[in-house]
Image: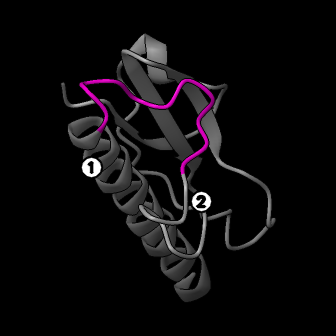
Amino acid sequence: TAQKKARDATRRGDMKAIQNALEQYYAQNNGNYPSSCSISTDYLPAGIPKDPKTGLSYSQSCGISAYCFCALLEGGNGNATNASCTFGSGSYFCVKSLQ
């Protein structure tokens, strides 16, 4: 249980780091998000984080006007209530464009 909670905390932190990087990108690129969900190491020095257990990329959806990144949590308590941020069954923690 402690390991699951620690991985979920890492996932939530990863989502917030991604959100911060994408919002910084938006502010510096004429009000556009990256259309391909990729972002340079100027914004995320270690690159886009991956799931701490599986090593796979997080679920994502991107366009120049909006984005959504979600992490599947092991312990539940996700926040995915917006249909555009749902990537399947389970408890997801998602971040989406703030603008």
Name the residue located 36 percent from the left edge and 15 percent from the top edge. Answer: 65
Q: Where residue 30 sits in the image (x, y, percent)?
A: 25, 26
Q: Is residue 28 above or below residue 3?
A: above
Residue at figure coordinates x 63%, y 26% from the top left: 87
Q: Please identify the quarter of the rendering in which residue 82 is found.
A: top left
Instruction: Give the structural element (helix, strand or loop) at label 1.
Output: helix
Query: Where is residue 48 shown, x and y percent of the image?
Result: 59, 59
Residue 13 inside the magenta-drawn segment:
no
Q: Is residue 55 above or below residue 97?
A: below
Q: Nearer the viewer, mark 1 or mark 2?
A: 1
24 to 87, vertically: above or below: below
Q: Which stretch did the figure color magenta?
A: 29-39
Q: For the residue carrying disc 1, how many other residues have a C-alpha within 10 Å: few (<14), some (14-19), or many (20+)?
A: some
State the residue position of label 1: 24
**60 or 77: which is nearer to us?**
60
What's the residue type where badge 2 is placed?
A: Ile
Residue at coordinates 50% horizontally, 39% vertically from top-left? 69
Q: Secondary structure at mark 2?
A: loop
- At label 1, which amino acid type do we have? Gln
Mark 2 nearby-residue class (10 Å; few <14, some 14–19, many ≥20): some
84, 34: nearer the viewer? 34
Q: Main secondary structure of the magenta part?
A: loop
Query: x%, y% of residue 95?
Result: 36, 40
Residue pointed to by mark 2: 48
